[in-house]
Image: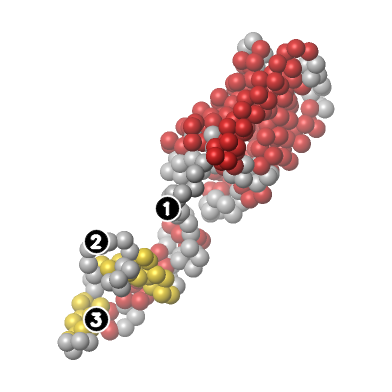
Amino acid sequence: MTGISSFVWLAVGGILRLFDFGRWTIPLAAWLSPVFLIQFAHVNDPLLGAAVIWLVMMLAGYFALRGVIPLPGVAFPIFIALLAVLWTLPFLADRLLFDRLPGLAATLVFPLAWVVYEFIVAKASPFGTWGSIAYTQYGNRPLMQLASVTGLSGIAFLVAWFGPIMNFAWDRQFQGAPAASALTVYGVTLGLVLLAGGARLAFSRHAKTVRTAAIGWPEGLVGMDKVMRVFTLRPLEEAEQPALRDAYLRLQEKSTQVETIRVSDELLVDIAPDGTVYGIELLNANTQLRGGDDGALVIVNEALGKRCAVALAE
């Protein structure tokens, strides 16, 4: 394959990369995109190939993660450019070592490099494992069972290993014992993982359930655009500051499990099953607390007919 014709595979890999993560995730694309990008890297100069792959990664990331990563202004493309460097490093490592290692060992460079990249990012990033290629396979339940043994790294390794295996056989025109051995080893490995995962699902007991919780972004709480204004270089204007402030009025120490009830867009109440109220959260607190009563917090005991005003500090 000539260097020029390899750009066809680069284009295919780039298009697939656009759909293997982010806004338009197609699980199969995560397996296929490295196949073509690795093929492009193998037939081009290492540095040139890495630079072009970085550009493709950056463009794919820019469109796939637009609106997913809420960074304002030029911060978003700069972040994507830096992230694309990390995505490119496994391809560069594979390009530099694939022809220096014997047999199947050459196919392990890319998946190992990818898993190391994800591990480092998971430890260093405040967002943990967000962005792992393993998440693209969330609908593949038998494959997902591997996470119970190896964590996300096992799934990421299997997905990333597919590309080098296919290129190993591709370079040999899918003929001969080496190509057949590589495809067989991978096929058997993947087959055993899926078989074991399927068996775990089929024979698992469902008598017990596990309560889980997820942290999301409730609609109407505070607009994401307002939160991200904190990270901009321009100081917050006076009109913007109240939307980023809230207050929690603790009525008593929580001694039991409570449920948070959303009364309105600006008021949340922590209440126990027996009706005891433990706390009240005020969103946009400045506006609510300073809107009347001369800026004081007024507490009224209707049963005793008593009223107490607490002045709020400026």
Name the residue beneath numbered marker 1: 211
**Residue 176 rendering spot, x and y as whole percentages:** 78, 13
Mark nearer the N terminus (1 vs 3): 1
Q: Quadrant of residue 28?
A: top right
Comparing 44 with 197, the one in front is: 197
**Location of the C terminus (image quadrant):** bottom left
Identify the residue at horizontal 45%, vertical 41% (top origin). Answer: 128
Amino acid type, callout 3: Val
Mark nearer the N terminus (2 vs 3): 2
Mark nearer the N terminus (1 vs 2): 1
Indicate which label's residue lies in the foreground, 1 or 3. 1
- Marks 2 and 3, how far apart at CA: 26 Å
Rate crowding at label 3 as few (under 14), some (14 to 19) or many (20 or more) other CA atoms within 10 Å.
some
Rate crowding at label 1 as few (under 14), some (14 to 19) or many (20 or more) other CA atoms within 10 Å.
few
Q: Quadrant of residue 167?
A: top right
Name the residue beneath numbered marker 2: 255
- Marks 1 and 2, how far apart at CA: 20 Å
Q: Quadrant of residue 170?
A: top right
Q: Secondary structure at mark 1?
A: loop
Q: Is residue 285 above or below residue 291?
A: above
Q: Is residue 87 above or below residue 225?
A: above
